Image (cartoon, rainbow, N blue to C red):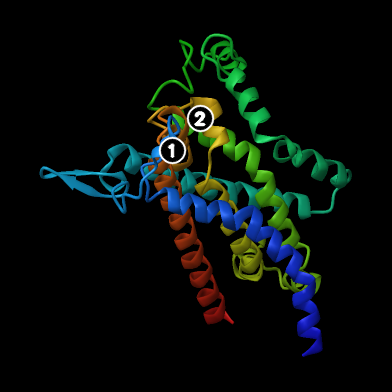
Amino acid sequence: MEKIRSAWLFLLPMIITLAAVAGWPLIRTIWLGFTNANLTDLTVTEFIGFENYLSFYEGEAYGLLVDPDWWNAVWNTVWFTLVSVSLETVFGMGVALILHANFKGRGIVRTAVLIPWAIPTIVSAQMWGWMLHDQFGVVNEILLTLGIINNPIAWTADPDIAMWAVIMVDVWKTTPFMALLILAGLQMLPEDIYEAAHVDGIHPVKVFFNVTLPLIKPALLVAVIFRALDALRIFDLIYVLTSSSTSTMSMSVYARQQLVDFQEMGYGSAATTLLFLIIAALTVITITAGKLKLGEEA
């Protein structure tokens, strides 16, 4: 009992700090979502209930839940998350397997692989924005020189390919993060299993799917959850590359547009609250499903 009391005393400063830094802003944002707060005049803020989410006037529905731009942002965010996390998981697994092998200079290669992830997102987004520029970008220059394309491509301005350009940049930057977490799981596997498989003459592909993959599932699950949560709240990469374009607008970019561009603090806070609830719900579902899956296999 004394140890438990001591543990709570040690955790108390952290809990208080989190409550002050994260808890109060969250509660304030949720409250503002039920008001008509506007940055032009905060003195006339009134409680309006759920009108920011859904309201009816003269037979017409208004609010966030019937706003096509919001649902477009939701779809963009979900699509971005599904595609980017899937690609990063596959590529991260491949990179982790390579880095796990014994070869000369492995330490240097491991350090070099982490460089894209170490670069701040704003910096890498701006760098790729220049590289993908339709007139002066090096990507178009290389593709034109190789004869792959005949005319420069507006990678971040064309609505048909802008999201794919964003996904490409995100995969380049975040794959090392996935590889690092998967590599940590690989390094904890017992070597005698692989030695036995080698002696028995089992094909490496079968060893991977029947031995390696099942054993690193817990680490893989953690990596996917962490990356998915980060992708669901994506803002900086999309905003720097494509600004407020509707073809790539995420939920975070939509909330920022309402809060800053339109100065609708109440409506933007409602969008932020919905974003928080969606991420929280998906987190609970993913973790629960993962625990159940791992429990069945155990």
Residue toward you, 20 or 102: 20
Q: Quadrant of the N terminus?
A: bottom right
Residue 36 location, x and y as percent? 36, 42
Q: Which residue is mark 2?
A: 165
Considering only vertical position in the picture, is 246 above or below 8?
above
Which numbered disc, 2 or 1, marks the residue that appears first in the sequence?
1
Element at label 2: helix
Identify which amino acid the numbered label 1 is placed on: Thr
User: Residue 125's spot in the image, x, y percent?
Assistant: 61, 29
Secondary structure type for disc 1: helix
**Viewer-nearest of labels 2 and 1?**
1
Q: Position of residue 254 (x, y in %)?
A: 42, 37
Q: Are marks 2 and 1 in contact (CB under 8 Å)?
A: no
Rendering quarter of residue 122: top right
Q: Which mark is residue 43?
A: 1
Local packing at callout 1 (Cα closer than 10 Å; few below 14, some 14-19, many 20+) is few
In the visual, does 33 lie left or right of 94?
Answer: left
Q: Closest to the observer: 207 or 182?
A: 182
- Identified at 49% across, 47% down, the residue is 81
Q: Nearer the viewer, residue 66 or 133?
A: 66
* Image location of residue 56, percent across then percent down: 18, 47
What is the C-alpha distance between the residues marked 2 and 1?
43 Å
